[in-house]
Amino acid sequence: MTAADELEDFYDKTVTVRTLTGTDSWGDQWETHEDVRCFADETRTLVRDGQGAEVISETTLTAPHEYAGIFTPGSEVVLPSRTAIVIKAAVADPGLLDLPAHVEVNLT
């Protein structure tokens, strides 16, 4: 089993991500990604957003690192129970260690 496969059993949910790709004269522009595998932790957490402000995250998603680019701040994530907004996302890169890389996403 490779390090990348070690978290696969934990990705027990699928979500739809509407990636915010920009804003123009027509409004916000979105790109939809369906069936994104992840693990959802519904623990309320105090986090800092991209501007350094303290905000409450209601959910933390853990997903395979190949999805890191779709979780831009302001993007929408359709969870089984609600739609949430991405506060921030970061890749956990193990470097030379034999650990699985993944992305951690804080949601409203």
Image (cartoon, rainbow, N blue to C red):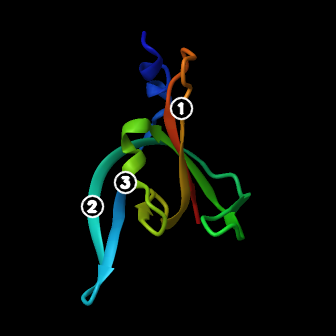
Report helix, strand or loop for mark 3.
Answer: helix
State which tag comes first along the sequence, 3 or 1. Answer: 3
Q: Which residue is mark 1?
A: 93
Task: Give amino acid for label 2.
Answer: Thr
Spot occupied by residue 76 in the image (x, y as percentages of width and height): 42, 66
Q: Which residue is mark 2?
A: 32
Residue at 56% x, 58% y is: 88
Q: Nearer the viewer, mark 3 or mark 1?
A: 1
Which residue is tagged 3?
70
Asked if 42 appears above or below 62 in the picture, the reply is below
Q: CA distance from mark 3 to mark 2?
A: 9 Å
Quarter of the rendering occupied by the C terminus: bottom right
What residue do we see at 45% from left, 36% from top?
12
> Helix or strand or loop: what does disc 2 sit on?
strand
What residue is shown at x 42% (from left), y 46% (from top)? 68
Q: CA distance from mark 3 to mark 1?
A: 17 Å
